[in-house]
Amino acid sequence: MDDNRESDILVASWFTKHPADLAESRLFIISCLIAGLVGLLTIFYTAFQWRRNINLTWMKAIARSKKNPKARDKAPVVPHTWELESTSRAKSLNCCVCYKSVSPSQGLGPMVASNSFIYRCAICGAAAHLKCSKNAQRDCKCVSMVGYEHFVHQWAVRWTEVTDQPDESSYCSYCEEPCSGSFLGGSPIWCCLWCQRLVHVDCHGSMSTETGDICDMGPFKRLILSPIYVKELPKTSSGGILSSITHGANEIASSVRATIRSQSKKYKQVNDASADIGITSNISDTSSDHTTHTCEDVNGIHGLQENSNGILGNDEVDSSEQKDENKLEPKPTFDRSISIKQKEELQLAGMRPRYELINLPPEARPLLVFINKKSGAQRGYSLRQRLNVLLNPVQVFELGSKQGPELGLHLFRRVPHFRILVCGGDGTVGWVLNAIDKHNFVSPPPVAILPAGTGNDLARVLSWGGGLGSVERQGGLFTFLQQIGHAAVTILDRWKISILNQQGKVSQPPKFMNNYLGVGCDAKVALEIHNLREENPEKFYNQFMNKVLYAREGAKTIMDRTFEDFPWQVRVEVDGTEIEVPEDAEGVLVANIGSYMGGVDLWQNEDETYDNFDPQSMHDKMLEVVSISGTWHLGKLQVGLSRARRLAQGQLIKIQLYNALPVQIDGEPWIQKPCTLIISHHGQAFMLKRAAEEPLGHAAAIIADVLENAESNHVINASQKRALLQEMAIRLS
């Protein structure tokens, strides 16, 4: 101990006498640490660049293998369908022509990225610089192969990362070796654009010899619309093509102008006028050189570029032009409940469909997809691109102000059995169900819902989830499409709302309800949110923020006593009996399903305090009437701290309004002048419910499939199948 103490004293005294040496030693240690850190960063950077160069070499090798005449497959060649996209949405992508990154350098800042544009294929997801797109290979997905005896693999380069894939899809389908990019290189990889299988280029020759390159379309073969049954109709005259070219160029200019306006709100340093003129003229000039690729329409009709797979415009430009409309009584661009007939006549007359379905086998069950890109979080663009990869783009339709569900239903009009997927909210589902009613199908198609709205109440009742987040957590679109293939068919009551004026005459066309109808304070909150969405659509960018805005608007009206006289402003009659509205009520709700406002159960079947009411069901041809006592009560309902007050159950409900009041149907609000609302049963729609883990769910799915096969084999007719499905839904509920 004494020796150690003496040595410590000697060292301390030495450093005291030589302070300069102490500073030099510290500086030396710090220099060594910095040098070591720089060395490690250099090693990591070199390894990253090496890996990047290897990946680029792989990509070039795959592209060269596709150019090799001996390696060409038997599928037809098809050009890409380009659409304009900001580089800020195309991260980690390489140009399919020059193989360079399409993202600008990060050192240039976010302004350059947001105002730079590339071309992105709407079908396969390939990206290209504006100047490179005209030299791109014709290796996109071929949606029409009528005349081919067998459906063959369509091998191509996978230009984008596919997230909707199972783990086993990363292995070669021939040698079963991993297909992930090797750090030291290896055989290049091809991907089939239909079955999503991977194969090493070195294995392709042996596989083609053994299997004939026949493709079975993978796990979604019953849902995919096989291209060998899709016939492309002759194109329009040259005048129509020139008109489409002009329209496409105008849509490009509108899209770029709208993007620049939205970006200028975030970055005040940008000069609006100069950016608008400069970039728009550049893109328009570029587009004129590639009209043979950019004006192709995949699943729409000639002349409708907004909702098809060409260079697409921006719907938000239309909404910005409507800001000066009456906020208390908004006028939508397309009335979903009253203009279906006129809209269909306008679209199908003078505008010929691009494709026709012929000779589908009776066992085919293709999926017809409708996407509302303005619903909820406004993720329709990415959903369409992902579904185009997994399905045939011909069966994927976008809904908008210029195109409703009629075009898709017209294309599938001769398909005996098909299913529908609606990607949107409750309003979009009602829009599609109204169109199905109008077509009078002998065997109406059942409808599944991808919850892309804000509340998604009907999707919750049918066990599809409360939002896109739940879908992604359960395996993404791959698992979701598998669940559609095994879903059970159930029944949903639909109701008609007739609006009579004070003289008892019909004042406007009827509306239709699937979920609920609200009069009073809840409709006022929905109306304020609707007006806010029309004025500022950029604020509604995800489901969580949408709910935050709903809560904020509801909080504003907590102290508002606008509806303190509500019980004396309405009269409610159920099945001919007048129902007393409570004196503290500020709103009345008529419910058809057990979910309201994002999952609130208004009726609560397990509540045993009411002995004189029956349990709620969405297919018992009965409606439930409840009252709420203000927006504060709505808030407590949302968090489960309160319950709505039950008033009545019935089949025919009349609500008489003595003053102008806000009204909403399935989240679609408006201001209604004094009138009488008559709610009566309209019919029943077939819906798809996700089969739960319990045996009853799987049994219902199997029974529905057996009944469809029996109808296809003419064992039973359509009316018998409908009656059996209705009875099954009632017994299994």
Image (spheres, rainbow, N blue to C red):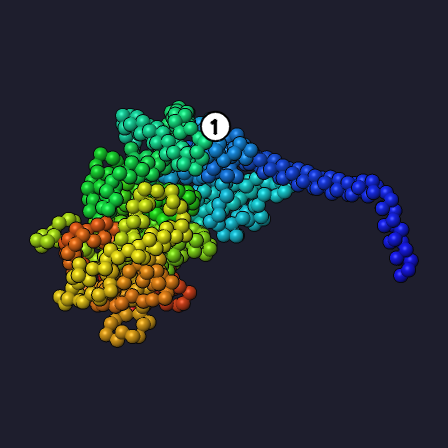
Percent coordinates x, y for residue 569 in the rendering: 17, 58
Q: Name the residue rendered at 42%, 44% in the picture.
A: 382
State the residue position of label 1.
Answer: 132
User: Which residue is the extreme one toward the right?
Assistant: 3
Quarter residue 663 falls in: bottom left
As drawn, is 404 to the left or to the right of 41? left
The answer to whether 389 is drawn above or below residue 496 in the figure is above
Q: Name the residue rendered at 34%, 47% in the picture.
A: 375
Percent coordinates x, y for residue 20 in the rendering: 83, 40
Residue in the foreground of this view, choosing between 432 and 592:
592
The answer to whether 397 is drawn above or below residue 281 in the figure is below
Is residue 380 visible in this depiction of the protein? no
The answer to whether 593 is drawn above or below residue 319 in the figure is below
As drawn, is 98 to the left or to the right of 561? right
Residue in the foreground of this view, choosing between 252 and 683:
252
User: Which residue is the extreme one toward the left?
Assistant: 503
Quarter of the image where the N terminus is located: bottom right
Residue in the foreground of this view, choosing between 472 and 220:
472
Percent coordinates x, y for residue 540 in the rendering: 37, 46
As drawn, is 673 to the left or to the right of 646? left
Residue in the foreground of this view, choosing between 169 and 453:
453
Percent coordinates x, y for residue 21 in the rendering: 84, 41
Q: How crowded is mark 1: few (under 14 residues within 10 Å), some or many (20 or more)?
A: some
Mark 1 element type: loop
The residue type indicated by label 1 comes to Cys
Is residue 621 visible in this depiction of the protein? yes
Quarter of the image where the C terminus is located: bottom left
